Amino acid sequence: MSTTTSTDLEARAAWSVITEPGDTVAGGFVAAIGHTDALSALENPVACITAIMDAGAASDQEQAAGAVQRWLPRMSAGTIDFALREASRHGIQMLDPAAVPGIADLGVLAPHLLWVRGDLDAAAGPLSHKIALVGARASTNYGDQVTRELATDLVGRGITIVSGAAYGIDGTAHRAALWNNGQTIAWLANGVDRAYPAGNRELIDRIAARAGCAVISEIPPGSAPTRHRFLSRGRLIASTAAATVIVEAGWRSGSLNTAGHAATLGRTLGAVPGPVTSAASAGCHRLIREFDAQLVTSADDAYGLLGR
């Protein structure tokens, strides 16, 4: 587990409030001088711009100044304290992302802090024991059936199922893992004190309460999801699983974004084929045809993505 000090965790918490996911200037700045010193530097905006440039976190002064202008309105002690109070009230733990295998591969795109409901050891479990199962929110009976079969078999082999707690394929994957006494991790695009989608509240609560499972977000408590946060969440799912399997996805499915992150990170990518007449599988066929996704037709295929 992480040996990060409480002071550093609080500074990380502040940066998770101040910035949006994927802010590369912030990522480069804190990587260069640390979260605590970077937070202190922000108290003097003019000097902070210079510090950002000195750290090599921005390409020019205009980019550095723009970053500071984005951060300052959110640099409120009240807002940061609210996130910390909400975490305490809901039993949410703070975790240094360095404790989670795979996240370091994101470089300056890595989150500042992880907010966790559930088992911290699940989050820090070996990368080689995790497979992401993701796909369409508007899943078909075929997609749900395949997802249940894959998740059931994989958790029986000791694999943790990673997904995003959305309707459709994600929710089916989590439920199958729980029904079979397996481990699963749900990444949210909002604060972990809020259930989104609301219809999956019971599922999210069950994951958080089960030993060996966790609900995690880089977004501070009290925060709502946005389109940008949903898209950014894909990089966390992809980076924290040794392999990603897209079970069912339309041509423009958001799960293809997760597939793109997996490919960029060098993670093994798999896709389940569907009927050639099904628009719900068009995205999977595209991944197999154009992006070298490996064909997954069984749990053996999915398990084989781990190179075992």
Image: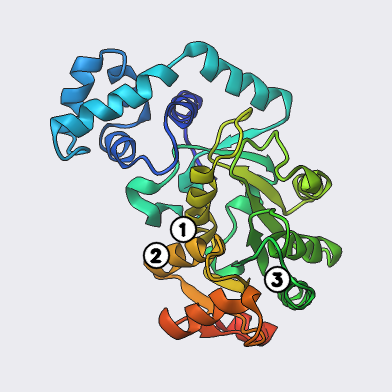
How many numbered marks does the figure carry? 3
Q: Residue at x 42, y 81 (%)?
A: 290
Along the viewing direction, whichever of 223 and 299 lies nearer the viewer: 223
Disc 3 is placed on an element classified as loop
Q: Residues within 10 Å of mark 3 (few under 14, many from 20)?
A: few
First in residue order: circle 3 vs circle 1: 1
SS at mark 1?
loop
The amino acid type found where label 3 is placed reads: Gly
- Residue 299 or residue 249, whichever sits in front: 249
Residues packed near mark 2 inside 10 Å, few (<14), some (14 to 19) or many (20 plus): some
- Measuring from the top left, give residue 203's x and y in whole percent: 80, 50
Residue at (32, 18) in percent of width and height? 40
When asked about the image quadrant of residue 37, the answer is: top left
Mark 1 nearby-residue class (10 Å; few <14, some 14–19, many ≥20): many
Marks 2 and 3, how far apart at CA: 24 Å
> Above or below — where is 81 with respect to 151?
above
Position above or below: 170 against 158: above
Q: Which residue is mark 3?
A: 158
Give the structural element (helix, strand or loop) at label 2.
Answer: loop
Name the N-terminal-most of marks 1 and 2: 1
Quadrant where the C terminus is found in the figure: bottom right
Label 2 sits on residue: 265
Image spot of residue 270 (x, y percent): 54, 78
- Residue 282 visible, this angle: yes
Cβ atoms at labels 1 and 2 below 8 Å apart: yes
In the rendered structure, the answer to whether residue 29 lies left or right of residue 185 reads left
Amino acid at the residue labelled 1: Gly
Q: Determine whether, in the image, residue 232 is placed left or right of residue 106.
A: right
- Residue 112 placed where, x, y %? 44, 37
Q: Which circle marks residue 102 in the picture?
A: 1
Instruction: Tell me which numbered mark, 2 or 3, is placed earlier along the sequence.
Output: 3
- What residue sits 61% from the left and 34% below the top? 224
